[in-house]
Image: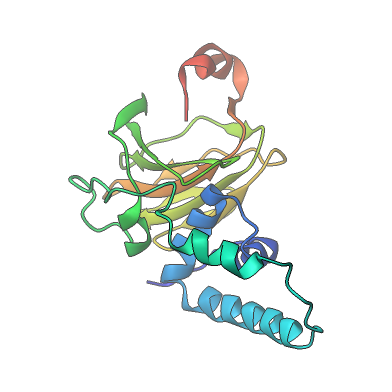
Amino acid sequence: MSVMHHPPAELLAGFSAGTLDPGEHLAVAVHVSGCPACRRLVRAIEGVGGSALEATEPAAMKAGAFEAVMDKAGQSPSHSHALADRSTDDDLPKVLRHYRIGRRRWVAPGVSMRPIELPGRSSSRAFLLRSDPGTHMLEHTHTGTELTCVLRGSFSHEGGRFGPGDFDFGDDTLDHQPTVGEGEPCLCLVAMTGDLRINGFFGRLIGPFVRL
């Protein structure tokens, strides 16, 4: 697998620092798990952060801080993940195996989605998006951001062709009209904030019925 498209540097930096929200973190984690180049970059960023911590003067802990941490360590997690239901997606990345994945529902002709339950609060929502071969999406933009990692198959738009392992980043400045490659369905992991905004008169008619 040759990965051609990667997350922006600021997303990789946020992933390394642990500052992304759960949906964004999951999308980047899936890409990094299959991309040696981004794994190396993440390790390098983490190394720089570790060196900075070593150079920082130690500060005294607050009274009772250690005991509070130990108490939390002994508690059960507030959110536990059931194993994902992979009855129709047997070769999902290992990163996804500890997430609960909902049932499939159709969102447009030839396009279905399965929601992914995220831990805690997240400004984004994550889901698996499956599109039939040759599907032409309607031209659209977003009111927020869209992080897409291709798991199987491919799609193309003005930014190029995206195959397994590739990462696509879109925001409200981007208008695109993805077309799914022929031969096999395209399965993607998507983390999205905001809403999908379909362009044109027809888009305004069906937009209220398309929910991702």
Q: Nearer the viewer, residue 72 or 37?
A: 72
Residue farthest front in this picture: 63
Residue farthest top in this picture: 205
Residue farthest right in this picture: 57
List x then y, in percent, for residue 43. Answer: 57, 80
Residue farthest left in this picture: 87
Occupied quadrant, residue 56: bottom right
List x then y, in percent, for residue 172. Answer: 70, 38
Q: Relative to 164, is 154 above or below?
A: above
Occupied quadrant, residue 75: bottom left
Q: Nearer the viewer, residue 112 or 98?
A: 98
Residue 35 visible in the current orientation: yes
x 46%, y 55%: residue: 149
Q: Relative to 187, is 51 above or below?
A: below
Q: Relative to 71, is 77 above or below?
A: above
Q: Nearer the viewer, residue 135 or 31?
A: 31
Occupied quadrant, residue 128: top left
List x then y, in percent, for residue 199. Answer: 61, 24
x 34%, y 33%: residue: 112
Colour scheme: rainbow
Residue 166 visible in the current orientation: no
Q: Tell me: 87 left or right of 209.
A: left
- State how many labels appear: 0
x 64%, y 38%: residue: 175
**Screen quadrant of the N terminus:** bottom left
Q: Tell me: 129 left or right of 6.
A: left
List x then y, in percent, for residue 84. Answer: 28, 48
